Image: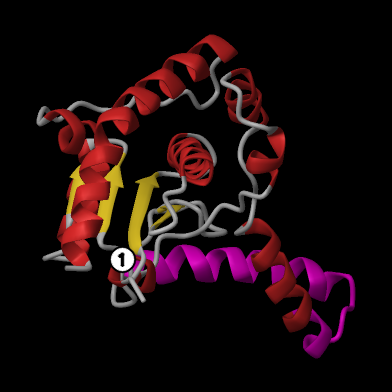
Amino acid sequence: MEEKYNVLLVCSGNTCRSAMGEIMADYVGQNTGLDDLLFDSAGYEVDPAHKMFAPKHDPEHYYWQNETRKMILGILKYENIPDVVSNELMNEVYDMMAQGGISSEAATVLESFGIPKSFSMRHKSKQLEEKLINGADLILTMTEKHRDFVSKLFPGSNSYTLLGYSTGKDEDISDPWGKDLGAYKKTATEIASGLIIAIPKIIQASKCKNM
């Protein structure tokens, strides 16, 4: 049985760029019989404190996680919620904050590209974690900053910018966050242009993996 070739797309919040890239690639794969390819996505600023993902030894990571936790627990204590219940609620809050979906603008633009909204609605934003990096055969980032971040934290990871991998020239995918639909269409077009060239290369790489 052939192994899946895992491609991980990475951006900041996993609600716009990497999410659109995953959904586009997944849609193409499902409609062209690319069963041996598996696309996923994540962001390094998805954690509840909205701070850059950092290794466990990084004090900044703990600082922001602890500050967020203290703030929420303080509110619960003020409301006289028992500690046991507070801890359970805290875990639920973290889960909800860490699993947002794709932005409505991104979903609208993908639908205008012919991708059913059902594909977008399945997306849940994920925090970039070591297990995702370790499970990826190829990591495609939206910007050079994202790529450098991944390479620094995980030396030896097979990471490229999407446009660098597809065209050989590193260029950033524009960030549409907070902008109008025109900006989202521009971003989606940039991602689609990169994927059109990248997917045949990925197919070839997957064949080499299973030789």
Label 1 sits on what residue type? Ile
Residue 174 visible in rendering: no
Question: What residue is at 62 percent from the left and 34 percent from the top?
Answer: 103
The answer to which of 113 and 11 lies nearer the viewer is 113
Question: What residue is at 52 percent from the left and 71 percent from the top?
Answer: 66
Quarter containing the N terminus = bottom left
| Dominant SS type (magenta) | helix
Please state the horizontal and vertical placement of residue 57, each as a whole percent of the image: 29, 77
Q: Is residue 84 covered in magenta?
A: yes
Taking 36 as reference, is 86 above or below it? below
Taking 189 as reference, is 134 above or below it? below
Crowd around label 1: few <14 · some 14–19 · many ≥20 (10 Å) = many
Q: Is residue 88 covered in magenta?
A: no
Please state the horizontal and vertical placement of residue 13, each as a whole percent of the image: 48, 45
Residue 192 visible in rendering: yes
The answer to which of 152 and 72 lies nearer the viewer is 152
Q: Is residue 176 left or right of residue 129?
A: right
The answer to which of 72 and 198 lies nearer the viewer is 198
Instruction: Find the magenta span and give its range.
Output: 59-86
The residue to which callout 1 is attached is 133
Q: How many marks?
A: 1
Please state the horizontal and vertical placement of residue 11, each as a whole percent of the image: 38, 43
Question: What residue is at 50 percent from the left and 16 percent from the top?
Answer: 185
- Under tag 1, what secondary structure? helix
